[in-house]
Structures are given as C-alpha cells and as structure tokens.
Image: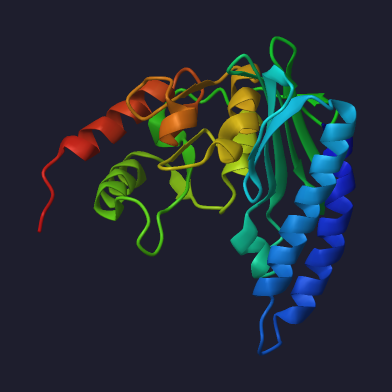
Amino acid sequence: MSAAALKAARGLIRDFGEVEQLQVSIKGPGDFVSAADLKAERTLKAELSRARPGYAMLFEEGGATEGSDKRHRWIVDPLDGTTNFLHGIPHFCISIGLERDGEIVAGVVYEPTRDELYWAEKGAGAYLNDRRLRVSARRQVGDAVIGTGMPFRDRGDQPAYSAILASIMAATSGVRRFGAAALDLAYVAAGRLDGFWEFGLSPWDIAAGMLLVREAGGYVSDLSGGQTMMTSGDILAANDHLHLPLAALIREATRAPRRG
C-alpha cells in the first residue's frame, strides 16, 4: 500500500508544481487537475492489482470493480483535497484502505508535499513514518482544537451544520477546516487535532483515517454514537475523553430549535 502511494505521489508532486504555474492562466487549472487525479488513480490501480490481483476495488473516480477474492476490497482516494490542489494549496493526500470481510484492517494516508506517511494495521498500532502515533491526551473540551469539513454550494444540511459549528466554536479553543478529511483524521491520530467531525463523506474519504484514529487509541463513531460511518458518511473522531462531550454538543445543537 505504501509503495503504491509513494509511486502515485511522484506524479502528483510533478503535477502540483504545474498547477501552481497555471494559477495565472485565464483557462485555469481545472482540467489539468482532473487529469492528474485520474493519472494517480491509474497508477494506484496498477500497483495494487499487481500486489493483490483478486481484490475488489472502490475508487473515487473509477467506482467499484469486482474481484475474484470476495473477502477483500481496496478503498482508495487518489487525491483527497482536490480543491486545495486546484488552488495550489499544499495540503492534499492519497488515501488507501483495505477492507476484509467488511472491516477496515489496514490503512495508508500519504501527504506528498511534507513526505508524511501515516499507516496502520489492525492490532499493530498507527505510525507516522517510523514514529508510533497516539491521540492527544487533552481531557477538557475547552482546551481542544477540532477539525471539520464544511458543506458548500448546495451540498449537505447547511443550517444543521451551522448550528453544530456555533456550538463547538463556543465550547472549544478553536475549529479548523483544512479541506482533506483523510488528513484531518490522520491529524487526530497524531494528536495535532483533538477531534474531527463531518457529514456526508464517502467511504474513500474515511476508510484509512478511521483505522489510524482507532489504532492511535482514539474513538470513531457516526454522529449518533453508532458505527454507520461507511454508509452514512457522518463521522466523529476524538480521544476517549472528548468523544462523548463532543457528541453531546452535536446532539444538543441538532435538537435545538432553529431561528428563521
């Protein structure tokens, strides 16, 4: 998984350099970035297929591919943080999760511009390059910095999200929106963020990151405390001290009557 991510990342880094130059053009870099995304996907498919020929695949762009091995599936986002990439912002990643019998058992999140490789295997811990990861030890919500992803354009329930955001902003030391959910979850695993929540994500956004958080000692659930993250796309990740208080803030905010 790591070798596949590193190989695909070489192309992304080259393309990212081109995108930065294209920012000044009238046409803009949108088509170029779409091509870069698809090129990374082709590299990842080729490398993962070579390593495990029978595994099924689920890619953001290419969709689902059945495999002869019915127990295993790769769940891959070749470029998480596409909007950042498009605008020349150096915060994006490749995310690869391995699902066995419906459970994520291995994950890799690679951030090329900082050469940071986050990886985890079920029961073996989570790591950043060669360093073992642990979620933060903060116990008080008031000391916490929380990551999130915001709905945009006509996507998601913006009033509900705004109510939750207001509640968490008022209770914590700050909220950050970086624009790449897989990296947000990796940052929770590394203790850089104390928690993270978002609505309506896709399996490739969260598969690897969920395992990173769990193997770093954190807790991951949907927004009601269940385990429907891969189907609902709603996720809350934090350490075991902050998860319940954050879940309570989210629950109270969504129940509160809205002004209008």
Decide: is 220 above or below 87: above
> In the image, what residue occupies the spot 34% across and 27% down?
247
- 200 vs 84, left or right, is left
Task: Choose top left, top right, bottom left or bottom right for residue 235.
Answer: top left
Task: Choose top left, top right, bottom left or bottom right for residue 44.
Answer: top right
Q: Quadrant of the N terminus?
A: top right
> In the image, what residue occupies the spot 64% across and 70% down?
87
- 148 vs 1, left or right, is left
Decide: is 236 above or below 121: below
Going by the picture, which residue comes out furthest to the top?
123
Q: Quadrant of the C terminus?
A: bottom left
Coloration mode: rainbow
Residue 188 visible in the displayed image: no
Decide: is 150 above or below 101: below
Q: Position of residue 39 (x, y in %)?
A: 80, 57
> In the image, what residue occupies the spot 25% across and 31% down?
251
Q: Position of residue 188 (x, y in %)?
A: 58, 33
Residue 71 visible in the displayed image: yes
- 113 vs 149, left or right, is right
Task: Choose top left, top right, bottom left or bottom right for residue 256.
Answer: top left
- 201 vs 192, left or right, is left
Q: Position of residue 160 (x, y in %)?
A: 26, 47
Q: Position of residue 206 (x, y in %)?
A: 57, 35
Labels in figure, total: 0
> In the image, what residue occupies the spot 79% across and 52% down?
40
| Nearer to the camera, 9 or 220 | 9
Decide: is 11 above or below 137: below
